[in-house]
Amino acid sequence: MAVYADREAFIPYRRPDLVELCLEEGKLTAADVQKFRNFCSILSAYYHFQFHQVLERLKTNFAPFDPDADTKGVIEPTPAQKANMAVKVVADFQSILERANYIPISQASLQRALQKDSLIKLKTKVDFNDFQQITCYCRGDIYKIDLVKKFFKKVEQTIDVFERVVLLIHFQEHKYFERKKINTKNLNFTPGKMYIYLYKNIPKFDLEFLFPNIKISMTWKDRLLLGIPAIGAAIPIILKILPQLLLILGIILFFTGVPPHLEELKASEQQVRNLMPLLVTVLSLLVTLGGFAFKQYTSYKNKQIKFQKNVTETLFFRNLASNAGVFGALIDAAEEEECKEIILVYYHLLTSNYALTPEQLDDKIEMWMEDKFGTKIDFDIYDPLRSLEAISGQILRDGEQEASRPEITLLTYDTQGNCCILPLDDALKVLDYIWDQTFLYT
């Protein structure tokens, strides 16, 4: 069984399409075609019910940390209970992400992303000490061609992009920010809450923009672009007002009792004694310098607004869900991935002309995906095998009692380690039995 470092386990095709493609191969008899569809349908219904229970547990434990909650808790959990609930949220969340074939991004990788130049040229800083917990996963590490502005034209650039990024962050409590002498009323997040985001098509080195506590400032390049023109514009202004500066200097010296050299300052005694030119000179100087300073400040603020607009547009148009809404999207993705994997395993074992070990089955499915779709994946064979092995029930014949029949699983192994599955008729009876047992209330 080959292991590929440059492939993912994610199957980028819909479950119904995979089912139909399996049937189009013609390896199943006409009588088994509908049975296989029924098998896939009841399997999906079974996992939908299983994942629904996980979703309810997630929502229950997430309730005290939901920043968007519009309902109130009847009983406020204690600090110890909240800490336990936070641990359960993260554990279930990570489990769902992995079942949906997402890959974890370490905090070290996030730190490296902060140090790299992003597509939006900004100096950024994220204080990771603000968080009690950071969970970041991605799926679909691909390269895309995008148009990037360089100097006065746009050029094509290859960008490393994550097709899906999921981020869960749990902020520190109020006391932490109070110790930092930060007014929590001015924060754009609520301390102690969890924030969860699901984004699409995020460049790898723009991950820092997903954090709500990001601090943005201008790069040295942008500061120079503002500073150099400012210096260039200031020089002629200083040369223009230099005589006025000399006049003011002469007046200051005159009133302080120091005899100025009026000839060198190019100012007459009459000018010095006259207060009116002094007021006009000071006012002219203030207006000139103030107008220039205001112009530079306005230019800087416009630059900041443009940066913020770019960040806002990037996150707005790429956001798929946030907070509790992320759970539904990920549960659906995990349900799809798990069912697709089980269906592919069961189908290839059902139609194989010879016995297959798990390793041989893994290679067979990967080759099938490449032949049919031209898609290279690193199929995770052991999870669907464990799932099939865990699905067990009884096959009851007419008149038999449940107690008289042992439970059997959909998958077993022979003495050589080959995978063995139940035929379609028996597999459907096992799934039907499990479904019937799900809602027994008497």
Image (spheres, grey):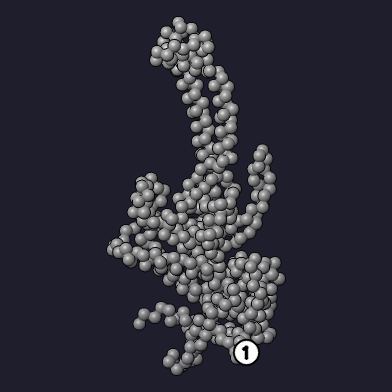
334 vs 299: above or below? below
Q: In this view, does 340 lie to the left or right of 169?
A: right
Would you say residue 373 is visible in this rendering?
Answer: no
Residue furthest to the top in view is: 270
Specify the quadrant of the image occupied by residue 194: bottom left
Query: Which residue does the image show at 44% across and 90% down from the upper left?
Result: 402
Instruction: Indicate the quadrant containing the N terminus: top left, top right, bottom left or bottom right.
Output: bottom right
Say which amino acid is labelled 1: Gln
- Residue 141 seen from this side: yes
Please tell me whether mark 1 sits on a helix, a strand or a loop. Answer: loop
Q: Which residue is drawn at 59% across and 73% down?
A: 380
**Residue at 51% of width from left, 26% of height from top?**
292
Relative to 397, does residue 90 appear above or below in the rendering? above
Q: Nearer the viewer, residue 401 or 334?
A: 334
Q: Position of residue 165 (x, y in %)?
A: 54, 59
Q: Residue at left 49%, top 84%?
A: 392
The C terminus - image quarter: bottom left
The image quadrant of residue 153 is top right
Q: In the rendered view, would you say 120 is above or below 396?
A: above
